[in-house]
Amino acid sequence: MRLTLFSDLALRVLMFTHAAGDRLVNVEEISEAYAISRAHLTKVVNALTRAGYLTAVRGRSGGLRLAKPPEQITLGEVIRATEPDFALVACFASGNQCAITKCCELQGVLHEALGAFMAVLDRRTLASIALRPKDFRNLLRMPEELP
């Protein structure tokens, strides 16, 4: 299984925002830090805001901050909100045309594996994977005003 770039960026945006603490961050800053497209990042940020993980503050001195404590944001929730589907194989998708679906055991095994994968993500929170502001400063050249 491979997560989409969208989900990967969603997790990285949340980690960056968490590391900023109370300071508002903006899309431009995150885009520069990760060297990724501002346009693509804007879509990710919009999805995270609609899903209730980020709060957007409008205006000249606006920006983004976490909408809830990082201990309340599970990785499983974020992945479910950002992945388009979990069709690991053709028989998981709607309109399944596989000739052996009725007698195949693979589908059950893969459902079990997907469940185990998501169970691990459901046990972990943003707080459990977050880097410290100092780590981001060193790795991504964030502004020095961070704690």
Image: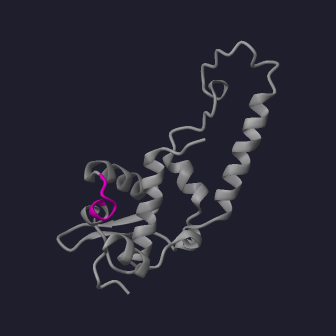
- The extreme left residue here reads 60
Residue 115 position, x and y percent, is 72, 46
- Where 108 falls versus 17 (above or below)? above
Q: Which residue is found at the position 39% from the left and 58% from the top?
A: 49
Residue occupying the point 60% across, 19% down: 95
Q: Position of residue 106 (x, y in %)?
A: 77, 29
Residue 52 visible to the viewer:
no
Principal secondary structure, stretch drawn in magenta: helix
Where 30 falls versus 21 (above or below)? above
Q: Can residue 68 be spotted in the picture?
A: yes
Q: Quadrant of the N terminus?
A: top right
Please identify the quadrant where the C terminus is shown.
bottom left
Left or right, 70 with respect to 114, comes to left
Q: Position of residue 87 (x, y in %)?
A: 61, 33
Which span of residues is magenta-colored? 31-36
Q: How many marks?
A: 0
| Residue 133, image quadrant | bottom left
**Is residue 54 highlighted in magenta?**
no
Residue shown at the point (59%, 72%) measured from the top left: 128
Q: Answer with left or right where residue 38 lies relative to residue 111.
A: left
Which color scheme is applied?
one colour
